[in-house]
Image: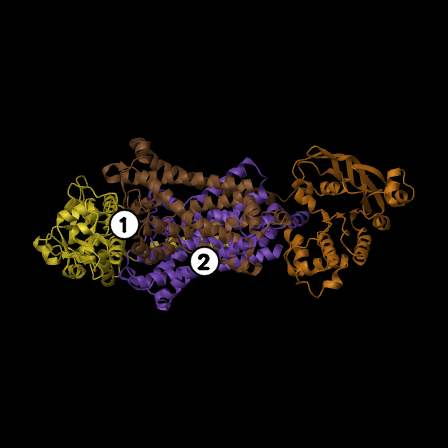
Chain colours: A purple, B yellow, C brown, D orange
Amino acid sequence: MRINPKKVNKFIQIMLNVQAFFTVGILIVIVALILVKGIGNINLEFLFSFPEDMGRHGGIYPTIIGTIMLVILSILFATPLGVGTAIFLTEYTKETILTKIIRFGVESLAGIPSILYGLFGFIFFVIKLKMGWSILSGVLTIAIMILPTIIRTSEEAIKAVPKNFRIVSYSLGATKWETVIKVVLPSATPGILTGIMLSVGRAVGETAAVIFTMGSSLRLPTSIMDSGRTMAVHFYILAREGISMEKAYATALVLVLSILLINIVAYYTMNKVVSRFS
Amino acid sequence: MLKKIFIIFTTVALVFICSCGLKENRQGKKKHLITIAGSTSVMPFVEKLAEYFMLQKPNFIIDVQGGGSTAGIQACINNTVHLGMSSRKLKEGERLNEIVICYDGISIVVHPSNPINGLSMEQVRAIFSGKIKNWKELGWIDRRIDAITREEGSGTRGSFEELVMKNEEIDDSIMVQDSNGSVKEIVATDPYAIGYISLGLVDKRVKALTIDGVVPTVSSIKTGAYKITRPFLFLSNGEPDDYTSEFIDFVLSKQGQDLLRKEGLIGSYE
Amino acid sequence: MVHMNRWVSIREKIVKNTLTVFALSSLLFLFLIFIFILIEGLPLFLKVGLKNIIFGFKWAPTKGYFGIFPMIISSFLVTFGALIIGAPLGLSCAIYLAEYSGKRLKMILKPALELLAGIPSVVYGFLGVIYIVPIVREYLGGSGFSLISTSIVLGIMILPTIISISFDSIMSVPRSYREGSYAMGATKWQTIFKVVLPAARSGILASFILGMGRAIGETMAVIMIAGNALKIPTNITDPLRTLTGNIALELAYATGDHRLGLFSTGIVLLIIIMALNYLANFGIKRRI
Amino acid sequence: MDVKIKIDNLRVYFEKNEILKGIKINIAKNMITGFMGPAGSGKSTLISIINRMIDFEDNVKIEGRVLIDDINILDKEINPVSLRRRIGTVFAVPIPLQRSIFENIAYGPRLKGINDKIELFKIVSDSLKKAFLWDEVKDRLDMSATKLSGGQQQRLCLARTLVLKPEIILLDEPCSGLDPISTAKIEEALSELKKEYTIVLVSNNTKQIARISDYSAFFYLGELIEYGTTEKVFTNPSQKKTEDYISGKFG
């Protein structure tokens, strides 16, 4: 039997169609499941009241605060470092062995799985530096974990700023730093923000690295030396220990919605950058 | 831009200072912090006790963390916590002050739909040592037994090994979960599962088996008929300080013991 | 006038030095991570012996056995399982996006798929436990906490990685290659299979390797769904324990040699991950 | 003539290629000096040496001296940033920064530490007037500079340079992309400006050089072929090559 190439072509196209939509379907199903099962249990009271009986009743307020503290502090810690590194790599140095080594380091950091960050944070911050299970330990661990993302996206964003802007700035008598601060960074800001948002998403959803460094105390953290629980960790414990499926779905919904929102904002700002320079 | 960065950095610094300040402040207002860590089996009950205690005495803050019995004992020896929690007896060389807050039975649980109601100690041992792998051997359908144990280092596992397994080892093919809750969750959803959890956690989602014909209940434990029991301990390095003692006294008081009893545990004086 | 304001040139110097320190900090962190995992894990290798850890079959750290061979095998098993599920789906999705979908669809699908990557892994694990485990238990037997369930969940989790990197490498195949093929009378799929995919080969390979890296490093979803039994699975419905699962299950409880054993597990994991990253980087670089 | 820039035996190498082969030229103060020559003749490189923008290129080797007011600007002691504050540059393509018209021009003064609104407004409007752009933009100073037309953008760049009150203005083919009307406006501005500034104009357009420059230099393959008053170079060139170039036989 001779195979008709046109029919094969059609067949393959249909197959690809099916697979592509199957894949997209998975996303829709995941989000839909969480949405349908979780929406009924979400209300203001759930968001702003304290959990009772290990989370079986009540809300998730302390975990929201724990998540916000973790995310904001780790971003504040990682952003200057990450953007600074990106500026150094793009503006202050030529391709040398040093930059190669630094890039290698960043790549390697990016590839390390989060459980190893957890292992490191646990032994270094929690045990050796005697910070204990605390928000501070979690913040430092997560900051190191998200650093490569921030460096790489910032570097891309800074590289995308046209060289001409720098030339003009220098020709008008600006120093390197003035050029970076007044011309390069403002143009690269949306791209850098995208990287930060992606990192926020990662920090919000992280469990393995957080649970071993920040602990899982359900109390409302009042200082960075307190242990705390993030939404992701709370969800993990609720789901895994079968404490309450309703609360687990509701927490998952809050978690997924906030991450989707963050990613959409990130994507939107990134598109703005792309259209700006093309 | 430079200004903005400066402002951000200042804010960070302020946040740090404030948050440290808060901590100072808290101690300044004479709030007493008691840190407790250890067995995850004991933790949920102590959390509940702490919740009640803090309601009555708002000048106390009690921080309850998991970590496992072994970690709790270590933390106590290193003086990093005020109290350790353990769900197993101390080994030789672990010299700490023991306070029995209550007793707990370890019940062997299966899915409610499982027709088997009781096993002998030998059968349980055979299941967990891998000698019996199929429900058919116990008189039910031809289906693999999904046995679940706890992870190495867990106090519940330690007690289970000591009281049930005796000298036999738990087989490698048996599933491992890292908390009472997750063992219970699997048993509650898998009709062919068997596991062991704290008696206090047994509810209608799982069925507790009789062992050698004895139903695990508060009374059967009290009389000593049900053999798989263990103490829940508070541990302190030397005599506990006054504030910690106040909490211990609350736990051992009638109110505290009633709370524990309501959770299915057996009071320390019974 | 010719000489710079002194404060300005001092500021420039301070800035440059600060930025250098910032840039070096990532190296410092990498160094610290390596050193502290090695310091904790190596002594046990010396004490128990490399062979007894890497090729040991028995893991009973409180009794002096530290064999992680079954976990190494299990880690690779779930990773390949994830690849078997994720690679064909991901690649065909990438081909569809790059070659067949219209611009408008691309604009919607690409970001939608990238959002998949943002969903926390614990959510995948949870949904796996609720929906995949019972189906496997019902139709394939066993407890459902198994190699097959874990592979499915990980396979879905690595889809975004595979799709986005394969897509980029397919898109970077020059248009002229395709035109040349069409000019010789090839159909679209012939062009894709004979010209485009071979040209994008190394990038696609890199996407698979990075996907593997993600699968082998995943922790929380895995301990929720893998069953964590210590034996090497002999059947797709058998439970298994990965290297990451071993660390996460026992870290909080471990003291003494037990903890060192977990750090040894970490060292092995770190070495595997580094090797995979090199392979992936090599693939990506060759493409450029 | 009153010499502002004295270039003495300047040789420049890019990797192994000699781009400038021993240039000697004196550039007169408060005059327009036109540099012409075909592509690759080295005239743009010469410009980038005078303002030290060449520092941003890799693998460059420079020999010889460039004296401005008898100070060698290639000296290590010289800070290129402060040098560039004395030398304005206008590039071939107008490059407005991504900010408003006003802020584009205020960029340089702000770097110098001038932040007073009234003072800024005064110097910005002055330089816009000098660049013959004021009338066209005075009502929309807050508009993004990227929305201006090409010719307006180039005059904006000129104004941005003028606001720094440089001693020297370097123009690197400033009219290459512009229509005749815009070109005429820029030429008009330059003729006014030479009263205060020393201007170097690089152009491929020999007619433009002939129209507005006082002195003309012809470069060819990294060598200075001919230099003199514009009148002499265009009416009675001493070299055959110059004559061929001016008459359009090559280039």
The image quadrant that residue A42 belongs to is: bottom left
Is residue B167 shown to the viewer in this render?
yes
Look at 77% across and 55% down and name the residue there. D178
Q: Amino acid at mark 1?
A: Asp
User: Viewer-proximal residue, C49 or C71?
Assistant: C71
CA separation in Å, label 2 and label 1: 35 Å
Name the secondary structure under disc 1.
Answer: loop
* Image location of residue C77, percent across then percent down: 37, 44
* Circle 1 crowding by C-alpha within 10 Å: few under 14, some 14–19, many from 20: many
- Chain letter of mark 2 equals A
What residue does disc 1 label? Answer: B178
Look at 27% across and 48% down and name the residue there. B176
Q: Amino acid at mark 2?
A: Phe
* Image location of residue B144, percent across then percent down: 24, 50
* Image location of residue A3, percent across then percent down: 53, 51
The image quadrant that residue A38 belongs to is: bottom left
